Image (tube, rainbow, N blue to C red):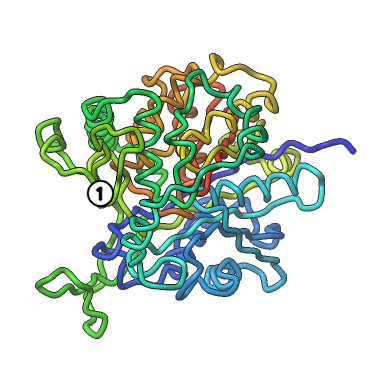
Amino acid sequence: MQLQNAVIVDGARSAFGRGGRGKLVATRLDEVGAQVVRALLERNPKVDPALIEDIAMGNVGGAGELAGIGADTIARLAGLPAEISAVDSNRQCGSSMETLHRVAQSIMVGATEAGIAIGAERMGRSLGGGPRGTATRITEFNQKRLKQTDVQRNMAANHFQDFSVPFPDEILDYSPVLSMTQTAQNAAEVYGLSREDMDQFSVDSHKKAVAAYEKGIYKDEIIPLEVEEPVFDAEGNWVEAERGKTIIFDRDECIRPGTNMETLGSLPAIKGVVSPTGQEIRITAGNSCPTNDGFTAAIIMSEKKALELGLTPLARIVGFGIAGVKPQVMGLGPIPSTRKALRHAGITADQIDRVEFNEAFAAQVIPSCKELGIPLDRVNVNGGSIALGHPLGATGARLVLAVAHELRRSGGRYGLATQCIGAGMGISTIIERM
């Protein structure tokens, strides 16, 4: 079978709202998605909606308006043909990068010619269909030590070739059912990162995001949305019974101008995190990503069809990689997944011009880039998720689109989008500017 090239024609997203207390709280996320998809098709008039054969959504929570097959609902609201097929997928934080892979791979093998990959997440009200009240239970469970068996140790031994440092037994023996903040602490301990290292990385993320907005960098990436302004009570809780006015939402809410080392240094460590090796707790809200609501969409097409239509795609998709790691250090998943993607693309890390690395935690980005040999000055040059936000299911596609737009601006050739995934995985995509 001769494979076709799959290309990213265009892509866009909503601005990312603050989870639970932001400007997207009172607006249905399926309507947010429909607005983004409609706007994306309107600015690409050569893409006849009838050409779109499949729409695939990445989502983690799977509740509320996104229950069932949320991709199908969004397709109907966006006015796509009734014959379109739809699917939802959950690979935790990597969900919409996963759906982008699936749509692209279907095109590569000739099963389809065009599709839309989308990602959506509502993190403020509920996650996984229930209240977000599990932190205490997880913390209690983390106090129990579940030792690895010798068989598990031997099976895992071959995976350590991806890392240049040893993993202490105290961390590897720790419970595999972990909060994400705990895994960040583990990564920081394995690589000897200081609180100052991580806080400085976070300060830089906010500074770069502020500068990018001042330059108008996100103008092509963010679709201005008409949303209902939520009404909050004195405690900051959304008052669902009260209706707000219609406003335009077009700016990520979690960027904090003026963020500096002093303000981040004053933040307390996150409660419930422990140190398996008896060290200082270094993970704070300041060096972690926030929780968010948001939506992302990308039009994927065969290169042949795109050129027939006279389109100028953003980029060609040239490499994929998915890999598992120990759950205790899940944040390091991008190391093996990126190495897989590089092998698939047939290039080396020094050929990567721009990187969009999901900043779930500063603790996992810094060592991962060091292991991969990627200079930090090529990474998240317009700010990352610590500043912009991380609505779980929407982030993966955002990363791919952000690096595609940045390659076009900078003139670079190859870009990498990568992220860690809860439960111990990494996912990576390599693209080539066209």
Q: Which quadrant of the figure contains the C terminus? A: top right
Q: Residue at x 41, y 22 (%)?
A: 378
Residue identifier under label 1: 254
Q: Picture quarter containing residue 320? A: top right
Q: Is residue 67 visible?
A: yes
Q: Secondary structure at mark 1?
A: loop
Which percent across, then down, holds residue 288? 30, 42
Amino acid beneath label 1: Cys
Q: Residue at x 44, y 60 (%)?
A: 121
Q: Is residue 281 above or below residue 373?
A: below
Q: Picture quarter containing residue 211? A: top left
Which percent across, then down, holds residue 242? 21, 83
Which percent across, then down, holds residue 217? 34, 36
Q: Residue at x 60, y 38 (%)?
A: 313
Q: Is residue 39 above or below residue 403?
A: below
Q: Nearer the viewer, residue 252 or 433?
A: 252
Q: Picture quarter containing residue 171? A: top left
Q: Alpha-carbon neighbours of circle 1 within 10 Å: few (<14), some, or many (≥20)? A: many
Residue 30 is left or right of residue 303, and the answer is left
How many marks the image carries: the answer is 1
- Which residue is at the far right? 1
Q: Which quadrant of the figure contains the N terminus? A: top right
Q: Is residue 90 above or below residue 424?
A: below
Q: Is residue 211 visible?
A: no
- Which residue is at the far bottom? 241
Q: Nearer the viewer, residue 109 or 307?
A: 109
Residue 349 is left or right of residue 380, and the answer is right
Q: Nearer the viewer, residue 214 or 209?
A: 209
Q: Residue at x 35, y 71 (%)?
A: 27
Residue 403 is left or right of residue 152, and the answer is left
Q: Nearer the viewer, residue 156 or 221?
A: 156
